[in-house]
Amino acid sequence: IKLVNKKIPDLFLLSGGGNDLLNKAVLSSIIKTNTNICEQKDKTHIDCFVNQKKLERRIEIIIAGIKIIANELQDIFEENKAKFEQDSTKLSIPREFKTIPLFVHGYDYINVKKEQENCPFLQRIFFRCQWLYPVVKDFDPEIQRKIAKHLIDEFNKALKKLSEDQAF
């Protein structure tokens, strides 16, 4: 963000949240390992495996962090607006100056079983590609996929809602 003070970017791409949601410590608190409570329910229902309140809370924390970054960008923009307007000829995307466009992106589904196989070498050395698997390895592969899909769907839904928020 400090570099934005020196040179106006055409846009700001914020790639964040995925590792904050899919790290082992967070997942260990969200994923239920004792599914005995589901004996009366459909044993494949997502509520048997995911603590929805904890998931929603974690996503709220991540979204709050994104909003903080967006507000900081807006503050920098406001403080440097005159300079940015003067330097507007250097932009590749002409626009009326109201703010620095901020882009966030959603996430695709992960193949839980193959997350380690598809991991680049250096990340593999430091176990950087073991997100979901260590927490769900004891579940049936169909349940693993269902959990992964639910986590990603909930996070993407929150990102979409954030991007549609006019105040943001």
Image (cartoon, rainbow, N blue to C red):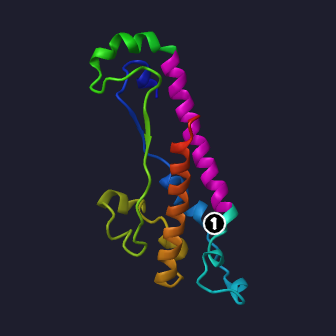
Q: How far from the left and from the top, in percent, is residue 92? A: 27, 26
**Quarter of image, res 84:** top left
155 left or right, relative to 36: left
52 left or right, relative to 131: right
Q: Callout 1: few (<14), some (14-19), or many (20+) C-alpha neighbours within 10 Å?
A: many
Is residue 168 placed above or below 115 in the rendered structure?
Answer: above
Is residue 88 placed above or below 134 in the rendered structure?
Answer: above
Which residue is located at x 52 percent, y 60 percent?
A: 22
Which residue is located at x 54 percent, y 64 percent?
A: 151
Q: How far from the left and from the top, in percent, is residue 61? A: 63, 48
User: Tag 1: residue type?
Assistant: Ile
**Quarter of image, res 7:** top left
Is residue 99 placed above or below 121 in the rendered structure?
Answer: above
Is residue 74 placed above or below 51 in the rendered structure?
Answer: above
Query: Which portion, as a residue range, is magenta?
Result: 54-78
Q: Is residue 62 magenta?
A: yes
117 left or right, relative to 45: left
The overriding secondary structure of the stretch rendered in magenta is helix
Which residue is located at x 70 percent, y 62 percent?
A: 53
Where, quadrant-wise, is the C terminus in this rendering?
top right
Q: Nearer the viewer, residue 59 or 123?
A: 59
Q: Is residue 27 magenta?
A: no
Which residue is located at x 56 percent, y 36 percent?
A: 166
Q: Secondary structure beneath disc 1?
A: helix
Q: Give the residue number, with chain letter if any, for mark 1.
A: 30
Q: How far from the left and from the top, in percent, is residue 58? A: 63, 55
